[in-house]
Image: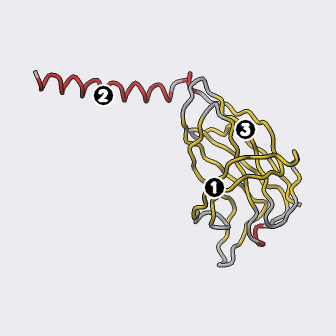
Amino acid sequence: MRKTTIYLLLIMTISGCSTLKKMSNDSSSKVSFKEFGYGICETKSVYNEEMENSPSRNHTLSTRFTLIQQTDRIPGKIGQKFGIEYKIKSNITRDILVEQVWIFPKSITDEKGKEFKELRYKMEKSTNDKTFSTYVIEKDYEVVKGEWTYQMFCDGDKIYEKKFYVE
């Protein structure tokens, strides 16, 4: 009897896992992007972590996004924050893995001579919740004038793109 119970639990667990996988990949769980605002902003920094693929080698997790000015024209100066406030919409509220990409107008070269054409990283975001993504110009070599492009991908599909012009 005990072996039968264990086998039934194992079969139910395996069946449940395959059902979850199907649910996350079926067409009913597609996502879309809803933009609320973009431009110069302020945030409250909560946590800093090292990010080797970033020109500043820093990734800041923040709260309290406040849009100061809706614009795609960004002053090129140290300390400048800019970004997008948005919601990833889905009929299923869940955490999803997205890839965020900042493409620079030309390569950024850090103080060690390492070049960065873009910043690309993956992060979990909750669907159906207002959230934001920002870039902070932290070092003088990050002040690169021209067209900066922010992109977001979900399951390899681009769901959003926004261009900023650092002046």
Q: Distance between the Cα atoms at labels 1 and 3? A: 20 Å
Q: From mark 1 to mark 2, how far is it between C-alphas?
A: 38 Å
User: Which percent across, then down, holds residue 124?
Assistant: 56, 43
User: Where 160 sits versus 10, above or below?
Assistant: below
> Mark 1: which amino acid?
Val
- Badge 1: residue crowd in 10 Å (few <14, some 14–19, many ≥20): few
Distance from disc 3 to disc 2, alpha carbons, whole Å, reads 36 Å
Packing grade of label 3 (10 A; few <14, some 14-19, many >=20) is some
Quarter that holds the N terminus = top left
Q: Which of marks 1 and 2 is in front?
A: 1
- What residue sits right under mark 3 in the picture? 86
Closer to the observer: label 1 or label 3? 1
Which residue is disc 1 drawn over?
A: 46
SS of the residue at dot 3? strand
**Which of these two is toward me, 148 or 2?**
2
Earlier in the chain: of badge 3 and badge 2, it is 2
The tag earlier along the polypeptide, 1 or 2, is 2
Sequence order check, earlier mark of 1 and 3: 1
Label 2 neighbour load within 10 Å: few <14, some 14-19, many 20+: few
The answer to whether mark 1 and mark 2 are in CB contact below 8 A is no
- Indicate whether 9 appears above or below 33: above
Q: In which quarter of the image is residue 119?
A: bottom right
Expressed as whole percent of the image width and height from the top left, the position of residue 5 reads: 17, 23
Under mark 3, the amino acid is Tyr
For the point 78% across and 45% down, which residue is it? Answer: 162
Quarter in which the C terminus is drawn: bottom right
Q: What residue type is labelled 2?
A: Thr
Q: Is residue 12 left or right of residue 46?
A: left
Residue at 66% from the left image edge and 52% from the top image edge: 62
From the image, tell me which residue sits under label 2.
Answer: 13
